[in-house]
Amino acid sequence: EVCFVSEANPQQARTRWFIDSGATDHLVRDKELFCELHRLKKPIEIAVAKDGETIQAEHSGTVKVVAVVDGKRVNCTIKDALYVPKLRCNLFSVLRVEQAGMRVVFEDGKATVYSGSEIVACATVQNKLYEMNFLARHGTEDSSLLTCGRVRKGFVLWHRRFGHLNEQSLKCLVQKEMVSGLDLSTAGTDDTVVCESCVVGKQTRKPHPPREGRRSSRVLELVHTDVCGPVSPEGLDGMKYFVTFIDDWTHFVMVYLIRSKDEVMECFEEYEALVTAKFERPISRLKCDNGGEYRNKRFEGFCKKKGIRMEPTVPYTPEMNPLSERMNRTLVEKARAMLADAGVDKKFWGETMLTAAYLTNRSPTAALEMKKTPYELWESKKPDVSNIRVFGSDVFVHVPKELRRKLDDKAWKGTLVGYSHNGYRVWDPKKRTVVTARDVDFVESVAVQQQVAQPDSQF
């Protein structure tokens, strides 16, 4: 028995699947994925990528998964899969697929599994590996993703407006009167549908770091910060990174887009000036990692001057700053889902990150016991969300009569890419820039991919 992809990144989530053209069997590392499992009469030795190294499989069984194909769910049964707990990811054998009478076609950066002329599964390239679009069907953490991807028809519009917030949290906003301007009275009890953008945006989610309670007793007592990137492709204006600042007491997050890590200092200076003026009190402590963007004379000197105590984490241990890690994951997942939903160029990732922060601040969080939004604690008033629209919607921006001639159009068409304190951020395709507009009309589509029941495909 041979496999070649077993040395995938050890940080990969346990339910991720990668195609291995050299594997002679389907290999599964997570016991919980099996719906049936039995001990082999004799252990099977499996050669891995490292020369001369082998690992053992002592059990085999059946795994049931859901393949996501163009937003539709295809039930798949993987038979005679070997249970190999020492693997770092699950491996999908091309040989076994072909033995089942199917074929795998590699082209244009993706792999497609065909049963006759029908597509039953597919994979896309992730970090030079082909990753299957599989979701678990039995008792694993990824089964929750099916719930996240399912939404009742009456909730679809607000689900998309809030960056693909789950139905339970939407209802919580209304039932606990956490916001104004959110009307779900017509949502009803319709049949559920599958939101393709949620599946695409959240299917490879890793387990979240443990959730911890607040470690502060007032606003600005503790601020968490982290830098993410580089992000590919570059965003608008050459942006490659984003840096977050999160107030521990309110969980209010602010995001800054930057071209290089050298700009983190300027962002923190701006953040510090803004929040200390707002609350008329200083930042007491700053939780950060040991990166050079924080651990340098200029940054440390600024904190010392302002009386801010830095609390750097141990190198290479992001779990020591779980609030930042969790927040970054939340923002990235929202951003990815909104990009997939809108179908816009990925260069707009920066705009989706800013929008994700805007929406997260107005959404319930377990860290605040689902009682208040970060915005309410930060601003001392409940947010009005009546202005929120679906990211990527068509926007018709009114042109003032002073700026147009008699036969000129009264509006121009753009794309919603975010919010500002006094209006909407709109992409102007002619000027190829983002502008702020207030007098606008929206065209929001409410389409969402519906689930299509199909018999299991067997590999």
Image (spheres, rainbow, N blue to C red):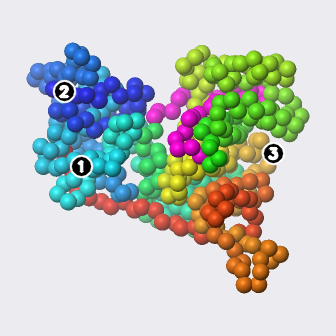
Q: Position of residue 426 (x, y in %)?
A: 67, 60
Q: Main secondary structure of the magenta part?
A: loop
Q: CA distance from mark 2 to mark 1?
A: 21 Å
Q: CA distance from mark 2 to mark 3?
A: 61 Å
Labels 2, 3: front one: 2
10 Å crowding of disc 1: few (<14), some (14-19), many (20+): few
10 Å crowding of disc 3: few (<14), some (14-19), many (20+): few
Give the residue drawn at x 75%, y 46%.
376
Give the residue drawn at x 59%, y 21%.
320
What's the amino acid at mark 3? Ser
**Magenta residue span:** 206-235
Name the residue that disc number 2 marks.
2
Q: Secondary structure at mark 2?
A: loop
What's the amino acid at mark 1? Val
> Foreground: 296 or 327?
296
Name the residue that disc number 1 marks.
105
Q: Earlier in the sequence, mark 2 or mark 1?
A: 2
Give the residue drawn at x 74%, y 59%.
436
